[in-house]
Image (spheres, rainbow, N blue to C red):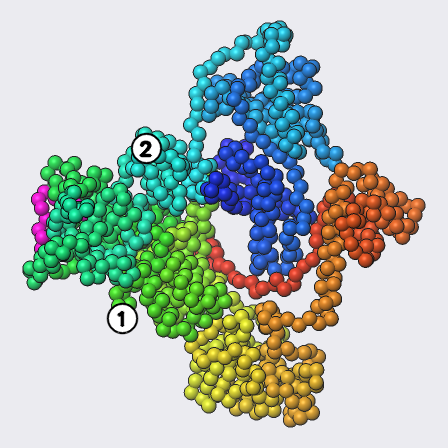
Amino acid sequence: NEKKKLNQVSYKKVKGLLFKYHFKYMRNQIEIHNYLTILLNENGLLTIKIMFNEQDKIQSIDYIKSIVQSCANNLIDKLDKLQGIYLMSKRLQSIDMSIIKIESINVFLITNQTISLDTFRRMLTQVEIRQFFEAKETISKEKDKQNDILLMYYKKFGKKQQDDTETDKKGITVNIKDNPFKLDSSIITIYGGYNLTQLQTIVNEIFVTNLLMKKPEFTTQISTIFDDLESEEEQEKQIKERSNIKILRQRGVKIFSSKCQKPRQPIIDDNLIIDKNRTMIYENNKYICPNDKYPYPGFTPDNIPCCFKFQGKGMAQNIKNKEIYETIVQPSNFTVTIEENEHGESINSFETLVIKVISDGQLYGFNIDSPYYYVSYSPEDVDFPLKHIHNDDLILKIKQKEDEEPLMSIWLEAVPLSQLISKPSKSKCQHQPDFEKANRLINDVCKHHSKNKFFGYNINSYPCCFDKERPLFNIKKIKEKDSTKQHILITDKLLNEKRQGLLPPGLNKLLNEIIKPDTNGTFLRWGVNQNELSFLNCVLEAIEHKTESMTINNTTELKRYLTVYIKNNKDEFEKLNNGTISLKYTFDEYIKEINNHIHWIDVIDLLTRVLKCNIFILDVPYIETESTKIFDYNNIKLVCDFFSLIDKTKPFIIMIKKQNAFEMVVYNTAVKWDKKSQKIEILKDKKTKSIINFIFNYNTNDTITSNIVNFLLEYNLSSCVKENEYPENFKYDQLYDINDIVKILNKTPNKIDLQLVNNFNKVNYIVTKNKIIIPIKETGIIDLPKVQFEDYIDTNLLNINEYNTQIKNLNKYLKTPIKLLGITLDNDDKINSVITNFGQFIPLNPIDKTKIKESLEILPMKYYHDIDQFLANKKQNINPEIEWNKKIETLNDKIYKIKKDLGESFINDNISKNQIINIIKTPMISRSEKINNIVNYLQQKLNLNNITSSDMQFILKHIANEMINDNIENLLLNNLITSNVFNPDEIVKRNNESIWLNLDDIKKWIKKFKQQD
C-alpha cells in the first residue's frame, strides 16, 4: 500500500504459479463472462478462487464445482502442451479423479435495514456480545462517516483443527459498513467461512445483536458507559452511483473507466423497452444509455461502447459493419425523387442523390444490371444504409443523364461507402454537414450553416455543405491527392484512415535519429481502416490496391484473389507456413477461413507469395489493469516469422501491431524531424516533389544505420534465425541448405529430382536423378516434385555398394563432399543404413553385410526408417518395454489415488497422524516393524470396499516406506501429494522468440555489429 501511494509498482509473492482464467456460463439464457484465479502450488495442489455476483443467485455447490473442474482441466491441458523451456516439466493430470474440497467461503450480504456502527461498536463491550464477537480494528474517517468500517472477529467458529498458524486463532473476520448505494442498508462481508450453515449462523447473530441494540435496557446501559462520548450525528446520506463496469465485463465487454466515465457507461438490458435512438445492438448485446445527459450510444476511438450527448451519426468509429468499409461507390450530385409505395399507392416521396455501386455484385448481392442506389438515414437501415433504386423510369432517367455529356461525367471519385456517411475533417470539407439532423429532407444536414445550406459531394466524394447547388457534371479525371503535407498527429492513439502520426517514442528515436537515410524525410505511422481486417488493409495500402494483373478495391476482393490463387496452385497449400497450415486445416477448411476471418499468422505466408513482398511486424505489448490499458513502448517485439522465406530482391512492408490493430510505417519526404528541438516540421519547398514511401527495399551498398530494411534483416538474422553452433571438436560437417544444394547441382548429371516429405510435412532429404539421397537442413516444402518418405523408400533405395559408387561421382561437384562413416544392421544382419559426415543416416536397400565391397565400421546402433511415424502417432507398436512402462504407470497411478484417499483421511485426524509420527521417529523398533505397524494404521484409514487391488499389501508397504523416509515434511500426513506419472510423448520442438531491445541495448548491438563487420 505504501508503494501504491508513491505510484510505484508492487508485486505479491506467491509460492507457485498464479493464473487468471476467463470462463463463461449462462444466466437466464444470457452468456456471462467471469474470471477465477488458479494457483498451482509447488506440491501440485490447485487452489482455486471463484467469485459470483448477487445477481447470479447460484445456490448449487455442485454447479460451482463443475465450473471449477472444467476450467482447471482446460488450463492443465494448455499447460501440458507448452513448448520451449517447459518441455521437461512434469505433465499434470486431469482433476476428474481428484477430490475438490471447499477451503473457505466469503460472502457479501446487503441488508434492508441499517446497522449502526457506533452502537454496534459499543455493544462489543457487553459480556453477552463478547462471547460471540471481538473488535479487531476500526477504519474511520471523521469527516466522512460513509467510509467507516467496523472490523471484528466471530469467535464461536475459529480455525480448523489442522491449522497451526497463530494468526487465525481469534476467529472468522467480519466487516460491516454502510451501503453507499442504498438508503437504510448496510453491507456485511464475512471472510474465510467453512460452510454455508456457519455463515448463516454468523449473519443471524449480527441481526440478533442489532435487535438488542434497540432495546431500552441495553440502550440505557450503553449510554451510561459512554456518557462522555458525543451523540451520533445524523448526517444526510448521499447515495453513490453504481458503476456498470462489472456488469458490462460480465457480458464480455472490454471497458475502462478512464476511457468511458461512470455517467457515460451504458447498461445491458435485453428486455427494457426504450426509445430506439437510446439503444444499440452490438455483438448480441443490447446497450442502453439511461442517463438523460448522455442519451445516445456509440463507440469511443478505442472501440469501447459508451454514451454521448449527441447521436454520433457520421462518426467513423460508430460504423461497425465491415461491408460498409468494403463497398466501393461513386456518388453524384444528380437529384432524383424517390416515391415509396404501399399496396400500389404512393405514401411518401422525397429527393435524394444517386449513388452508383461499383463493387462486385456477386460478392455483395448487388444488382449488376442496375447498380443505382441512394443513402437512407432511416434507423431501420443503420446496419447497411444503401437502398436500391428499382423504378424503371428512374433508372432510364439516370442512364440518359450518364450519356448526356460524352466528355463529362455525373459520377465522382470512387470511394468506400463509409466515406459518404462519415463526418469529414475540416481539411476535407470546411463546411461540415451535421448527420445528427439527417432525414429525408436532403438539405437538413446543412441548415445549421448561415450561407452554405445546400448538401452535396465535392470533387473528392466527401459529403459537404455549399452556398449553392453543386454542378451536375465534372471532367472525367481523378484529382491527385497530396497526403505528404497533411497535419501530423503526435499522440499515440490509433490513426484514422490515411492519417499520419509520429512513431512511438523509442521507435521514433531509433528510426529518425539512429537509422537515418541520406535523403530528407521522416519515418511516420500511417492509418488504415481499423476494423477486424486492419492487417489486410495495411497490405492493400502498401501495394496501392493493385497487383501486376488487376486492381483490388477492398479486402473482400483481396480474399477472393487469394482464394483463386490457392485453388489454381494447390501444391502451394502444403508449403504454407513451412507445412504447418496443411496440418492445421484441410484444403477446403483453409479456403473457408480465408473468406471468413482468418488470423493474420495463417495468411501472412500466402500473402507474401501471392503479392511477392516481405512483411516485418513490430508488436507493441501492453499492460492491462482494471481501469486502463498502457502500451509498453520500451519493449516492442520484432515478430519472428518462422514461416515465410525472406527474399531480399522483393519489397518490404513494415507494420506496427497494437493488440489486434495494425498500422504502417511509411517514409514522408515532405516532413523533417528536428533532433535538437525534438519536433516535427513540414517542409514547404515547392520545387521538390514530395512522396510517401509505403514499401522499402534492401540495398547491398547501404548499412544498417542508413537503410531500415538492412537493419531489420540483420537484426532478424541475429535474433530470430536459429544458428547451429558446433563445438570445435565436433566431428560432423554442417548440412547443406536446400536452396544451395539445388543451385550447385542444377546443371550437372546429378540434378535434384525430388524432395522427400516426412510425417511432419517437413523435408529432411532430397534425391538426385541418380537416386542419391542427400541429407539437408530441415525445411518446408519448396518448388520441387515431392514424394512421401515412406512411399519412396519402398522400391527406390540403392544398396550400400550402389550408393558408394554414385557418391564418388556426386562429390566432384560438392565443396563439402559426402563421406560414409559407418553402417547399421537390421535384425537379419543386413545393411539398412549408412551414416555420413553430416551426422545423418541414409536409408539403404538391405543387403547382406558380407556383400559390401568397401568395408565400413558397423555401428552399435539400430536404424528405423519409420521412426517419424511413431513420433507423429501415426503408427504404434506395443513391445514388451512399452507394456512394462504402461504397467509401471498404472501402478504409479494406483499408488497416487490411494495416497490421495489417505491424505484426505488425515485432515481431521490428528490422533492417527501423531501416532504414525511417533512410530516413524521411535528408535526402539526396526524399519520392517515400523512398516508393518504403519500398514496396520493405513488399512484402518482406507475404505477397502472402494479399492480392489491384488497387490494392496505391496502398495501399502511401499507407501509406508516412503513415509518413513519423509520424516521431516511428512507430505502424505499433511495431504501434500503429487503424481509421478509423466508422459514423454508430449515433448515437441521448441521455437525461438525475438524481443526488440530497449534503445540503449539497440545502440550496443549496432556498435557490436559494426565491429564484427
Residue 327: x percent and y percent? 26, 56
Give me the residue at 47% from left, 20% from top. Answer: 183
Does 87 sit above or below residue 296? Answer: below
Residue 16 visible in the picture: no
Q: Quadrant of residue 101?
A: top right
Residue annotated with mark 1: 549
Task: Report the front residue among 494 and 130.
Answer: 130
Total label count? Answer: 2
Give me the residue at 65% from left, 89% from top. Answer: 847
Tag in front: 2 or 1: 2
Q: Is residue 533 left or right of residue 387?
A: right
Task: Report the front residue among 33 and 177.
Answer: 33
Does 877 sit above or below residue 64? Answer: below
Give me the residue at 76% from left, 54% from top. Answer: 895
Residue 484: x percent and y percent? 24, 54
Q: Earlier in the sequence, mark 2 or mark 1?
A: 2
Q: Residues within 10 Å of mark 2 (few under 14, many from 20)?
A: some
Residue annotated with mark 2: 294
Residue 1007: x percent and y percent? 45, 60
Q: What span is colored magenta in the figure?
A: 463-474
Q: Is residue 443 left or right of residue 627?
A: left
Residue 287: x percent and y percent? 37, 39
Which SS class for mark 1? loop
Give me the residue at 8% from left, 51% from top. Answer: 471
Q: CA distance from mark 2 to mark 1?
A: 51 Å
| Residue type (three-letter) at the residue carrying disc 1 | Ser
Which SS class for mark 2? loop
Q: Quadrant of residue 952?
A: bottom right
Quadrant (top left/top right/bottom left/bottom right) for the C terminus: bottom left
